[in-house]
Image (cartoon, coloured by chain):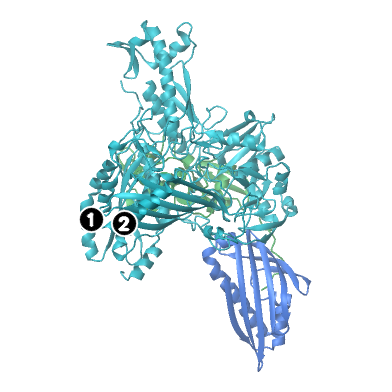
Chain colours: A green, B cyan, C blue
Amino acid sequence: MVLAEMPSAGDEETGPFVNVHVTVNGAPRSATVETRTLLVHFLRENLSLTGTHIGCDTTNCGACTILLDGKAVKSCTILAVQADGREVRTVEGLETDGKLHPIQEGFIEEHGLQCGFCTPGMMMCSVALLQKNPHPTEEQIRRAISGNLCRCTGYVNIVKAIQHAANQMAGPSGGGRP
Amino acid sequence: MTVHGGVGQSIKRKEDARFVRGKGNYVDDVKLPGMLYLDIVRSPYAHARIRYINIEKALKVPGVLAVIRGKDLEAANLAWMPTLMSDKQMVLPVERVMYQSQEVAAVVADSRYAAADGVAAVEVDYEPLPVVVDPMKALEPGAPILRPDRKEQTNRIWHWEVGDREGTDKALKESDVVVKENLYIPRIHVSSIETCGCVASFDAMGKLTVWMTTQAPHAIRTVFALVAGLPEQKIRIISPDIGGGFGGKVPVYPGYVLAVVAALKTGHPVKWIEDRSENIQADSFARDYHISAEIGATRDGKLTALRVKTIADHGYTDAAANPSKFPAGLFHIVTGSYPFEKAHVEVDGVYTNKPPGGIAYRCSFRVTEAAFTIERIVDSLARKLGMDPAEFRMKNFIPPEAFPFKSALGWEYDSGNYQGALRKAMDIVDYDALRKEQAEKRKRGELMGIGISSFTEIVGAGPSHTFDILGLKMFDSCEIRIHPTGKAIARFGTKSQGQGHETTYAQILAEELGISSEDIAIEEGDTDTAPYGLGTYASRSTPTAGAAASIAARKIRDKAQKIAAHLLEVSPDDLEWKDHKFQVKGVPDKAKTMAEIAFAAYTNHPPGMEAGLEAVDYYDPPNLTYPFGSYICVVDIDKETGEVKIRRFVAVDDCGTIINPMIVEGQIHGGLTMGLAPALLEEIHYDENGNILGGSFMDYLLPTAVETPKWETAKTTTPSPHHPIGAKGVGESATVGAPAAIVNAVVDALAHLGVTHIDIPITPWKVWKILHEKRAA
Amino acid sequence: MHFEGTFTVRASSTRVWSFFLSPQEFSSAIDDPHTIEVIDADHFRGTIKAGVAFIRGTFTWSATVKERVPPERAQMAVHGSGMGSAFDIVATLSVSESAGLTTVKWAADVQMSGTIATTGARLLQGTTEKKTNAFFENARKMLEGA
C-alpha cells in the first residue's frame, strides 16, 4: 500500500488541545493541555505538584509512580487525557490533616531515603502494595518495588521502611489506614 | 550533660521532612515567570564533519523562539570551553562532531514539547568520518588524529608515571613467583535518578542566577566568570536539592552554557533538563581503564613488587574532574593494604570518539580502579602460591604499628588496622565453615565461591601543597553564626546530594558547641551566602568541611570562654569546657551554657570585645584520610544458567569516628549496590561505528531491589590522627571495595576449572560460556 | 549489517529491470507510508514513516542510482535521516533470465547511526531483515501479478 502524502500531524476530530478533569488527592483539578501531554507533566507543570519526579525516558525507573484509581502506574507513560474523569493520588496526598502516612513515617524512621528523588514513587508503589497485601514477605516487597530504581540506598532500608509501615497499618492504632 | 544529636548518635535526618512530603526543591521544580525551555539537537554520528545546519523549519515550529548553533557561539568566543583538566571541549561544534549524541544545536521554545518539536525540525547534514573507538587502535601509527588542534599530532593525551621503574623491574625479575593479569574495566555511567539540568536567569540589573545540578557551586561560579567574562559578583549559582551526584554532577556540561546563552539572548529565564538517554549517552562516564598488572612474591608468600600499566580511554577530550596534578586521579593507591617495597605505575590517556569524562561514579578519583586491580591480582597470586586468600592477606597486610605508613608510590596512610577488619569479617561470616561447605559442594559438582576484598581508600582531597582543581586549592569551609537565643546557623562550601549534611554537620557542631542539633540550621549550595569551598565528591566533605566545622566551632569556644569568664567573674584560665559547657575548674555548679553565653554576646559582652558569636574556618587538610575495610562475598552459581547469586555479603568498614551510625550504614548499603552494579550488570560499549550500546535504561541495567542482596554491615574504628574529630569519610568506600569481592567470589567458584579472571560485568552469559567450554555443566 | 537473497519471478528480465529502476513502481513495494519525488532519472528523494519497535517517526531520504547496466545490474545508494538517527543503504541487484524465469540476486549493506542504532540495537537486525525481505517479496508478487 502506498500513501502519496503524509497523514496530517493534528487529529482533525479533537484538535491539538483538550480539557482534562482529574480528581487529584481528593480535589477536582483541571487544565487545558495539548493532547500529547503526559500525566506526569500535567501534574508537575499544570498543577504544580512537583513531588512526582521524572528519572528516565523508557518507563524503567518508576520515579513518576502515582496511584490512578488506586493502582500504581508510571505517570510518564500515561497521557493526561487517559486520567480524565479518574482519581489520582500523588505523594502530596499522603499526609492528611498534618499527620504523616505510616509509609512516610517508615521512610524517616528507617532511613529509607537519601537524596529523596526516587522516594515519592517508591512510597506510592508501597502504598499500592500494602493495600493489596498488608503483610508482605521481604521477597514480595522486593518484587513489588522492582520497578522503582534507587541509586542511593541499596534498598535494604527501603524494605525496612515498608515493613515498618506494614506493622503500623496492620497494628491496633494504625488499622485500616488507606 | 550529653547534647542532643551529638557525634555518634543515630538521629533521624532533618532533610527527610520535606522529601517524604514531596516538597524537595530540585532543579526541575524551579518555575520562573516567563521561563523558556531548551532542548538539544544531538549527533547520530560518532565522528563527522558538519556540512550545514538548516534551522528555517525549526524556527517556524509554533513555540520556538530561537536556535543556537556553533557559529553563533564562535562569535562570542564560546564555542569551546576549558575542561577541568585544562583540555578543551566544545559547547557546540563549528566543524566536526566527535562523539555520538554530541550537542550540535540548541532550540529554545516556550514549552518543553515545542522545544522537542523544534529539535526534530532542525536539519543537519553530516559527512561521516572514520571512527576511532578502540584506544589501542587510536595509538597505532596511521590512526586518524582526533584532535588536530593539539600541538602534538597524536591521540595520546598524556603519559603519567610514578614509582621506581628499574627497581620494580628488577624486583619482579628476582621474585620467585610472578602473576600477570589483564583487567578491562568497562565504561559505566553513574545515572543518579535525577538527570542534570539548570535554570539560568538574568535579572534586570544583569545579575545571572543559575539553579544547577552541581556538586561544586563555587568552582562553577569561578569557571563561569573566567570563561564567560561575567564579573564574579554578578553570578549566583544555586545548587538546591540534588537527586544524587556521585561525581556525575561535577563537570560543566554544554547544556549549562547553552542555557545561560539562551537566557542572555532571549531575556527570559531558560530551563534545560536532559532526558535519561541524553544523560547516559553524553554526560561524564566512569572507568574505561585497560589495565595490565604484575605482582611478585617470594616462594613463601611475601609480596615483593607491583607493576601496573594502564591505557585510559578518555573520549574526545580530557574532561575528567581530577585534581590537576593527577591525570590518573589517585590511581597510585594501587599498592592497597600492602607494604610493597617496589612499585611502578604508568598510565597513558587516549582520545577516542566517545563522550568525555572519566571519574563520575562514586570512585574517589580512580580509586575504584586501583582497589579492584590490587585485590584481584592479590587473589590470583595467592591462588598460584596455593595459599588461602585470607591467610595470604593477613600475612602481607601493613601492620598497625607501621602507621603513619609511607607507600612506595608516595602516599602517607594516616592509620589502619587491616588485620582487625578482615578478622572481624571472617568471624561474622564464619569463614572456616564456609570453606568446609565449599569443599563438600565441590565434590558434588556444585559451584560456590568465597571472595575477599581488603581495600584501602584515599579521600579528603586535599592538602594545598599537592591538590588543586584548575588552580583552586582544595580546602573547604564552614562559617558559623550563633544567635542571641542560642540557636545557630552554619554554612559550608560543600554540597550534599543525599549524604545528609544537614543532619551530620549539625551533629559535629552540636558536639563542639553544646547546642542541640535541632537548633542548628545547616545551609549549603548558594554561592551568594556560603563560604567558598570545592564541593562534595570523592568523599571529601567530612575530612575537609567536617574538620572546618570543628575548627570554626573551637574558635567560637575560644571567644565563648572569655565571655563565660566575664559572666562568672573569673579568669578564662579558671574555666574548662566539660559536659558541653564552661565550668569553673573544680566547681561544676559554676557554669555557663553556650545558650547563656550567646545571649551575653549580644547583651553583655566584655568591654573592648566585639559583639556577636561567629567564626569561619577555611581548612587546609594536612593529609588525606585512609578509610579501609574488608568485605567477604559468598556466591552460588547456577550451572544451568550461569547466574551468579550473592548468598551473603559482609562488609566491615572503618571510617574512623562515626558521626551518625544510621547514615554511615546507609552510605555503605548504597555504595555496595554501586559496586554490585558494575560487577554483574552494567556496561557501556560502542560498536565500530561509534554507536553506543547501552544508551538507555532498557539496556543499561541498574540493580533493582530484586538483584540487590541484604547487605550485612559491621565496623571497626581506627580514628584518623590528623582529623580534628578523627573522622575519615565513607561515602565511596563500599563502591571501591565491593567489585573485587564479588569477582573474587565468582573466580573462586570456578577456580578449580582453571579460571583466573573474568572481566566485569560478569553476566550469566559469560559464566555459561565458561562452564560450557570447561564442560563442567 | 549485510543482507542478501535470491528470488525467481515469472516475468521477463526487461520487465523486472524496469520495475526496480522506476521510482513509482519500486516504491509501491515499500510497506511503510512514504512520499517520493523524482529529481531526474538517477536521483530521487522523499520521506518515509518508519522505525524500529516504538522508535517511529518520519525520515527524509534521498537515493542515487550509482550504476545501471540494463537489464542485468544496478546499484543504488540511499541516505536517510531524522529522529536523531541516520541510515545509509547500498543495494545491488543482478538480474538474469532463463526460459521465461528471471532470477534476481540482491544484496543490501545497511549502516545505522543514532537513536535507532542505540536504543533499537537489539531489534535492529531482525526488523531490518524483515523489512528488506518484505520489500522483495512484495516486488515479486507485483511482478507476477501484473
Tell me which residue sits at (30%, 69%) in the image. B776
CA gap between label 2 and label 1 equals 25 Å
Question: Which quadrant: the C terminus of chain B?
Answer: bottom left
Q: Nearer the viewer, residue B673 or A120?
A: B673
From the viewer's perspective, is the residue at label 2 or at label 1 nearer?
A: 2
Q: Residues within 10 Å of mark 2 (few under 14, many from 20)?
A: many
Report if residue B567 is visible in the image: yes
**Disc nearer the start of the sequence (2/1):** 2
In the drawing, what numbered circle is on residue B177?
2
Q: Is residue B550 above or below residue C40?
A: above
- Pick out the residue farthest to the bottom: C99
Residue B561 screen position, x and y as percent: 39, 13
Tell me which residue sits at (63%, 49%) in the image. B150
Residue B136 screen position, x and y as percent: 52, 59
With B92 as the anchor, is B543 left or right in this view? left
The residue under label 1 is B435
Q: Amino acid at mark 1?
A: Arg
